[in-house]
Image: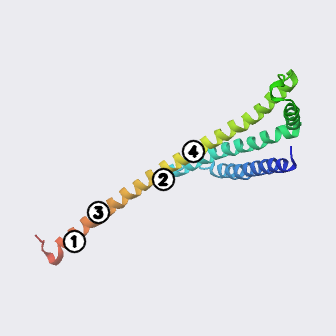
Amino acid sequence: MPHFEHLWAGGLILLSVGVALAFGWRQFRYLRRTSADPAGSEERVVLRRSARRRLVVSFFVGCCGLLIAGPYVTGLEREVVRIGEDRDRLPAGGRPPLDEADLRDVRHYGFWWSGVMVSLVAALALMAIDVWDVRRHFRRSLQRLSDDRRAMVERQLARLRAERGQSNGRAND
């Protein structure tokens, strides 16, 4: 594998594990800080649920980084590249099937990358659920504020009408 691909993989590993640790620690601290408030508001409950989901997302992102690193650390990546290069040297019609050891290495390599994909899809699904839940809560809160404001304006309007109706000691018709 060319040197550029090793740098690219190393960058992905460092980025994903670094992001997972940074954001995971942040969510963990938030959960610890708010755990002392058992009877929190609805907003606090939504934020704690969101923090838990984001902590799990951080776990999956970290898993992606570690699963990307696996084939490189174990040397499996070099073995799969060697198998591919050996097969490329043979004519297309004369390639024998892979022997048992090579087939096992190729399958393990596929399992590593399948794990990356599963972790990535799980993280993306949890992110979508989190966005949906926060958006739903925001819409409910916005509707509640709008209803409260409308009720306040109606009360003030009724009070103003009552005051004007009794101005100068007589009622207006």
Q: Earlier in the sequence, mark 4 or mark 2?
A: 4
Cα distance between the residues tagged 4 and 2: 15 Å
Residue under pointer 3:
155
Q: CA distance from mark 4 to mark 1?
A: 52 Å
Circle nearer the N terminus (3, 4): 4
Q: Amino acid at mark 2?
A: Phe
Crowding around mark 3 (Cα neighbors within 10 Å: few <14, some 14 to 19, many 20+) is few
- Secondary structure under the numbered disc 3 in the rendered image: helix
Alpha carbon separation for disc pair 2 and 3: 26 Å
Image quadrant in which the C terminus is located: bottom left
The residue where tag 2 is placed is: 138
Q: CA distance from mark 3 to mark 1?
A: 12 Å
Q: Which residue is mark 4?
A: 128
Q: Residue at x 86, y 22 (%)?
A: 99
Q: Nearer the viewer, residue 10 or 170?
A: 10
| Residue at the disc numbered 1 | 163
Please provide percent x and percent y for residue 146. 38, 58
Kind of residue at disc 3: Arg
For marks 4 and 1, the one nearer the N-term is: 4
Who's the residue at 18% across and 76% down the image? Answer: 167
Q: From the viewer's perspective, is the residue at label 4 or at label 2 nearer?
A: 4
Crowding at mark 2 (Cα within 10 Å: few <14, some 14-19, many 20+): few
Instruction: Return the residue found at the far bottom.
Output: 168
Q: Are marks 2 and 3 in contact (CB under 8 Å)?
A: no
Question: How many numbered marks are there?
Answer: 4
Residue 94: percent from left, percent from top: 84, 24
